[in-house]
Amino acid sequence: MPLLSWFSYLDQFRSACNTPSVLGLNRLQFANSTITAILRSSIEQNQFLVTLSQNYHFDFSLSDLTTYPTFKDLLNHKDPLVGTVADILQSFAVAPFPTGSSQVFWNTQVSQAFPGGSAGAGWQTANTQLIAVMDKDCYSAGQQTQVARLIDGNGNKISDVSKQIAVLG
């Protein structure tokens, strides 16, 4: 699933809440909101689940709302953002990584996939793509600085970078 789709699904979760309290939240705030704090009653929670199922074909149980306490956690249960981010990074890495194994890429040193570090052409292209697709609140300038430190650091793996981006913020 492309990265843009993940954020579209997050928006569908917001629509399924059917409560005005989520309208003033940006994507980052909504993603990190505790579901049971937004949907306080069992009626609201059940309506959310029914709407997700009928309108968007997501099937969750009531217990999932506490097992995966935030909207981001719930969506990650069905579609892990960290894997989607890693797929994007893999497509912009140097050869042979774009066509190689995702598992091998996950464990690859960043310096092998993106020579030149955060100033290198491969990372600049990947980062530009992330900026274009991710909400500015979810991939903020501060988050980009933290990711660049990982890109430039010694011994960091693609998994470290993917996890940091998937934190959102």
Image (cartoon, rainbow, N blue to C red):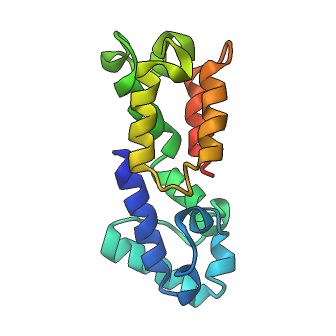
- Identify whether 59 is placed above or below 123: below
Above/below status of 64 relative to 16: above
Classify residue 152 as left or right of residue 112: right
Residue at x-position 39% and y-position 65%: 58
* Residue under the image location 53 percent in, 65 percent down: 27
**Residue 106 seen in render:** yes
Q: Is residue 154 left or right of residue 107?
A: right
Residue 169: x %, y % from top left: 63, 52
The percent position of residue 25, horizontal first and vertical second, equals: 58, 74
Q: Nearer the viewer, residue 119 or 9?
A: 119
Query: What residue do we see at 67% from left, 69% from top?
Result: 34
In the displayed structure, 145 sits above or below 123; it is: below
How many numbered circles does the render carry?
0
Task: Please identify the residue farthest to the front as the structure is shown.
Answer: 119
Tell me which corner region of the image, top left, top right, bottom left or bottom right, holds residue 130. Answer: top left
Quarter-of-image position of residue 143: top right
- How far across and down, in percent of the image, does residue 41 sit? 64, 88
Viewport quadrant of the N terminus: top left
**In this orientation, which residue lies closer to the viewer: 40 or 7?**
7
Q: Residue at x 46, y 38 (%)?
A: 85
Q: Is residue 66 left or right of residue 12?
A: right
Report whether residue 109 is seen.
no
